[in-house]
């Protein structure tokens, strides 16, 4: 990761901005929603690849800050949702696309199906994750400045 | 499938809150199928969208809205060896790829 950040720094102009945008492992909520109501039905289980990925990414950013390559200017978290018409579509997506990163336990699956079965006609199921955004400004040590 | 991502469009709202993309030269690393790219590319001077996944890039090229094709270029590359000259971009976006 530090190699990639080195490459990005190389192609950025002096004082250029790096935006780091990524979801954080945080036992994302599972919900059934409609225009009228929102019901929390459980949460996902973070698998080691997901949590270890966050740790490695954070360490890489700390390292490039320590090296004086980038300086963090601001950061914030915001909600980001994936939603489906039915619980089975959600389960299929998690199994196919996220099987290395998160899992859905049986209690959450059962609660989601039960809530969706009695919910309003416009109901959807969704996973609500937290996405982190941070801006970093490229730092150029004096010795690297070209006249 | 009925999948909807980010129906509140928070991702582009926060990206715009954090950085002024207008007339900037933007590098997006990890563009995938262009989901985020198309939401901001029209504001930029140019955008180079990079990903290592050839299949995703193929989708991004095919599905790219016709009005944006002059603004965005897609390149298959690994972020640890970017085939680019130095100091070419004002902004780099790591899109779910660090």
Image (cartoon, grey):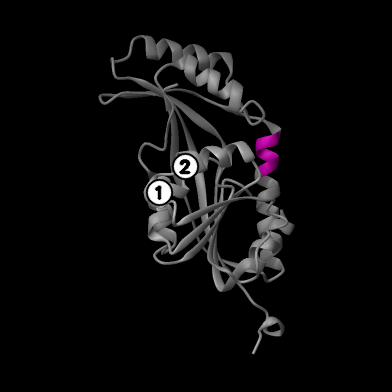
Residue behind mark 1? B39
Residue A39, x across and y down, in percent: 37, 23
Q: Is residue A64 left or right of residue B48?
A: right
Q: Quadrant of residue A93?
A: top right
Q: Residue at x 51, y 41 (%)?
A: B60
- Work out whether A119 lies above or below A54: above
Neighbour tally class for label 2: few under 14, some 14-19, many 20 plus, Cα within 10 Å: few
Q: Residue at x 42, y 10 (%)?
A: A114
Residue A71, x across and y down, in percent: 59, 68
The single residue placed furthest to the bottom in the displayed view is A147
Residue A61, x across and y down, in percent: 66, 58
Q: Which chain letter matches label 2?
A: B
Q: Which mark is residue A25?
A: none
Residue B94, x across and y down, in percent: 57, 53
Residue behind mark 2? B35
Q: Which chain letter matches label 1?
A: B
Q: Between A5 and B53, which is closer to the camera in this rendering?
A: B53
Q: From where the camera sits, is residue B11 visible?
A: yes
Q: Between B83 and B2, which is closer to the camera in this rendering?
A: B83
**Mark 1 to mark 2 CA distance (whole Å):** 7 Å
- Work out whether A14 lies above or below B18: below
User: What's drawn in magenta, residue-wise?
Assistant: A49-53
Q: Dot 2 lies on which element?
A: loop
Q: Is residue A16 magenta?
A: no
Quarter of the image that includes the N terminus of chain B: top left
Residues at marks 1 and 2 touching, judged by CB atoms closer than 8 Å: yes
């Amino acid at each position: 990761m530090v190699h990639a950040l080195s490459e990005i720094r190389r192609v950025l102009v002096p004082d250029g901005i790096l935006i780091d945008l990524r979801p954080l492992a945080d036992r994302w909520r599972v919900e059934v929603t409609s225009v009228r109501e929102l019901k929390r039905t459980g949460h996902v289980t973070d698998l080691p690849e997901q949590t270890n990925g966050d740790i490695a990414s954070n360490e890489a950013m700390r390292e490039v800050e320590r090296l004086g390559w980038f300086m963090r200017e601001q950061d914030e978290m915001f909600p980001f949702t994936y939603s489906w018409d039915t619980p089975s579509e959600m389960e299929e997506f998690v199994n196919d696309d996220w099987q290395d990163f998160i899992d859905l336990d049986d209690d959450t699956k059962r609660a989601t199906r039960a809530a969706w079965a009695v919910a309003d006609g416009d109901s959807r199921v969704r996973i609500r994750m937290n996405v982190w955004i941070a801006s970093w400004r490229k730092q150029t040590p004096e010795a690297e400045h070209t006249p | 499938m009925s999948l909807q991502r980010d129906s509140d469009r928070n991702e582009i709202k926060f990206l715009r809150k954090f950085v002024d993309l207008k007339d900037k030269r933007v590098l997006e690393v990890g563009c995938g199928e262009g989901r985020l790219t198309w939401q901001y590319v029209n504001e930029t001077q140019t955008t180079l969208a990079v990903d290592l996944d050839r299949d995703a890039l193929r989708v991004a090229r095919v599905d790219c809205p016709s009005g944006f094709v002059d603004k965005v270029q897609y390149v298959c590359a690994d972020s640890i060896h970017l085939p680019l000259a130095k100091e070419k971009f004002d902004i780099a976006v790591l899109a779910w790829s660090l």
